[in-house]
Image: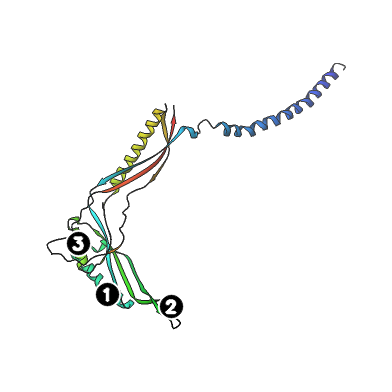
């Protein structure tokens, strides 16, 4: 019995010590789990992209083509003493414009009203008072009616004649003439490809100069493109030319551009 009692006492002591050791280790393990993400954030994950290894390039390309359509923005503007008279005058002239465009071969689907407005016109009048002072006031002198039309002309060989017929029929305002391609998807894509090719070529150049190489593309953003810019509205002079002559018009070339902003990742 003397030998058994020390053994039991030893076992009981070990049973009390082991839980205390385990409990003493738990705070240390929990601390390491909490600090692990912070350490990753501080030193960077193995596959993360560091700012110093990226290169941002902006490139632009333009492709020019001979236009095959034109847009005319023109119409009628009439002044009269009353609003109804101004409206009637513009209606008469605009009817003649529509008829002239149809005779010139412009389809109804290629004509669209772009602006219609009616506004009063005033003048400033100064009147002397009995006490010698001057009183200024606005005085209504009439109304102006405007009807503007956007016309798509497909026959560029007769564009000058179309303009002349529009004026002769009563058109007296002209907002601009714009040339374009009727189908421009392919030329726009060509500009995009050229811009991207230029961006990649410049990225390779910079990477080589820095002793690195282009690993991959991180982001691509597109911007830019061709957009017609209309001219300010002006009154047309009444056509006074021989029927054998027409307004000379040159289409030249139209350009479609594309811009890309590309971020590349560089590495060894």
Where is residue 267 drawn, in percent x and y? 44, 29
Indicate the quadrant where residue 2 lies.
Answer: top right
Residue 105 seen by the camera: no
Residue at numbered disc 1: 89
User: Of the residues tagged 2 and 1, which is closer to the observer?
Assistant: 2
Element at badge 1?
Answer: helix
Q: Which residue is depicted at the point 58% across and 33% down?
A: 42
Residue 62 vertical placement versus 40 (above, below): below
Residue at numbered disc 3: 162
Q: Which residue is depicted at the point 81% across and 20% down?
A: 10
Q: Is residue 218 left or right of residue 83?
A: right
Q: CA distance from mark 2 to mark 1?
A: 35 Å
Q: Is residue 136 left or right of residue 243?
A: right
Q: Residues within 10 Å of mark 1 (few under 14, many from 20)?
A: some
Q: CA distance from mark 1 to mark 3?
A: 22 Å
Whichever of labels 3 and 2 marks the residue nearer the N terminus, that label is 2
Whichever of labels 1 and 3 marks the residue nearer the N terminus, that label is 1
Q: Is residue 232 left or right of residue 56?
A: left
Element at badge 3?
Answer: helix
Nearest the viewer among 93 and 13 is 93
Residue at numbered disc 2: 135
Nearest the viewer among 39 and 149 is 149
User: Of the residues tagged 3 and 2, which is closer to the observer?
Assistant: 2
Q: Residue furthest top?
A: 3
Residue 253 vertical placement versus 59 (above, below): below
Tell me whether the residue at label 1 lies in contact with that at label 3, contact meaning CB atoms closer than 8 angstroms: no
Whichever of labels 2 and 1 marks the residue nearer the N terminus, that label is 1
């Amino acid at each position: 019995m003397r030998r058994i009692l020390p053994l039991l006492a030893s076992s009981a002591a070990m049973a009390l010590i082991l839980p205390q050791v385990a409990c003493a280790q738990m705070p240390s393990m929990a601390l390491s789990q909490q600090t692990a993400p912070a350490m990753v954030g501080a030193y960077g994950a193995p596959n993360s992209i560091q700012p110093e290894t990226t290169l941002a390039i902006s490139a632009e390309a333009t492709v020019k083509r001979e236009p095959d359509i034109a847009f005319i923005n023109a119409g009628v503007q009439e002044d009269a003493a009353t609003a109804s008279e101004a409206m009637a005058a513009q209606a008469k002239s605009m009817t003649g414009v529509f008829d002239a465009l149809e005779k010139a071969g412009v389809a109804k689907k290629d004509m669209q009203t772009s602006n219609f407005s009616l506004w009063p016109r005033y003048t400033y009048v100064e009147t002397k008072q009995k006490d010698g002072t001057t009183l200024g006031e606005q005085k209504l002198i009439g109304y102006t009616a405007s009807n503007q039309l956007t016309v798509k002309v497909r026959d560029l060989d007769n564009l000058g004649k179309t303009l002349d017929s529009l004026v002769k029929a009563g058109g007296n305002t002209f907002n601009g003439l714009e040339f374009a391609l009727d189908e421009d998807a392919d030329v726009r894509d060509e500009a995009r490809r050229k811009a991207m090719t230029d961006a990649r070529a410049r990225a390779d150049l910079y990477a080589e100069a820095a002793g690195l190489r282009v690993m991959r593309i991180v982001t691509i953003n597109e911007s830019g493109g061709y957009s017609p810019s209309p001219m300010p509205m002006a009154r047309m002079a009444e056509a006074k030319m021989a029927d054998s002559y027409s307004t000379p018009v040159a289409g030249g070339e139209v350009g479609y551009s594309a811009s890309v902003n590309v971020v590349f990742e560089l590495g060894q």
